[in-house]
Image (spheres, rainbow, N blue to C red):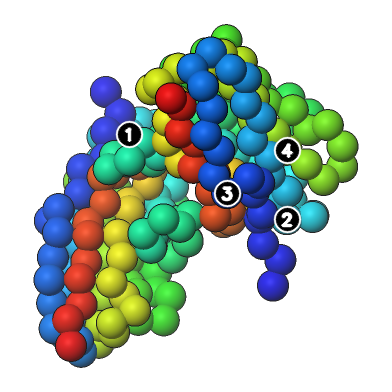
Amino acid sequence: KNQVEQSPQSLIILEGKNCTLQCNYTVSPFSNLRWYKQDTGRGPVSLTIMTFSENTKSNGRYTATLDADTKQSSLHITASQLSDSASYICVVLRGGAGAGKSTFGDGTTLTVKP
Amino acid sequence: EPEVTQTPSHQVTQMGQEVILRCVPISNHLYFYWYRQILGQKVEFLVSFYNNEISEKSEIFDDQFSVERPDGSNFTLKIRSTKLEDSAMYFCASSGGTALYETQYFGPGTRLLVL
């Protein structure tokens, strides 16, 4: 079954600290993995897109890693800001038959406190 | 900066009624999507649309659902006979180029409540 599992479910950190969010997936065949930021009541906003051959991709203070062999990804947030408080969602897109179908994780709810 | 827009922002309907949710994708985008998010749950893929036809659909997207691009700008999701369990936030998204690897831009969503 195609699944995306994220951990932790929620996380509280102090402003200025770093954190790392985890994503494990069983989606097959794999096309690409995406990290989104979703503020409450809003649509998801794309942070990174990684294909099979990419190990690391950065977008400002966000750095995503991908290990396609172990089917794991992480999102590292550096020097957190209050505005980073949101849900961070890992999404895997299928390749092959069913290409483009997305499987979403439950998300990690990040709270950044002053 | 171009953005995806959706109307209405909120819709309340009676069970069994038809609803049409509207989306205006980014103007030069070629791929369009609908997703839903039941309150407190994960986002779920419903359907993708390219070149005036459905590319992929999920198991959720049954005969009660249909999509249409009635003109050059709008992209609609119709639910023929709403059920209580259709209550959710519905997001439209669009992307350009080779959709598998392109960024999808999401709209702000339509919150549908079925009574």
Count residues near mark 2 (Cα–Cα under 10 Å), then give few for <14, some for 14-19, many for 20+. Answer: many
Residue under pointer 2 = B26
Count residues near mark 1 (Cα–Cα under 10 Å), then give few for <14, some for 14-19, many for 20+. Answer: many
Q: CA distance from mark 3 to mark 2?
A: 18 Å
Q: CA distance from mark 2 to mark 1?
A: 29 Å
Residue under pointer 1 = A27
Mark 2 vs mark 4: tell me if same chain: yes
Mark 1 residue type: Val
Contact, mark 2 vs mark 4 (Cβ under 8 Å): no
Residue at image x 40%, y 74%?
A58
Place of residue B11 in the rendered image (x, y in percent of width and height, measured from the top left): 55, 38
Place of residue B65 in the rendered image (x, y in percent of width and height, measured from the top left): 59, 19
Q: CA distance from mark 2 to mark 4?
A: 11 Å
Classify residue A87 as left or right of residue B62.
left
Contact, mark 2 vs mark 1 (Cβ under 8 Å): no
Q: CA distance from mark 4 to mark 1?
A: 28 Å
Mark 2 residue type: Ile
Q: CA distance from mark 1 to mark 3?
A: 33 Å
Mark 4 residue type: Phe
Residue under pointer 3 = B9
Disc assigned to residue B75: 4
Place of residue A36 in the rendered image (x, y in percent of width and height, measured from the top left): 40, 58
Q: Secondary structure at mark 3?
A: loop
Q: Earlier in the sequence, mark 3 or mark 2?
A: 3
Q: Secondary structure at mark 2?
A: loop
**Which label sits in the foreground, 3 or 4?**
3
Place of residue A66 in the rendered image (x, y in percent of width and height, measured from the top left): 30, 57
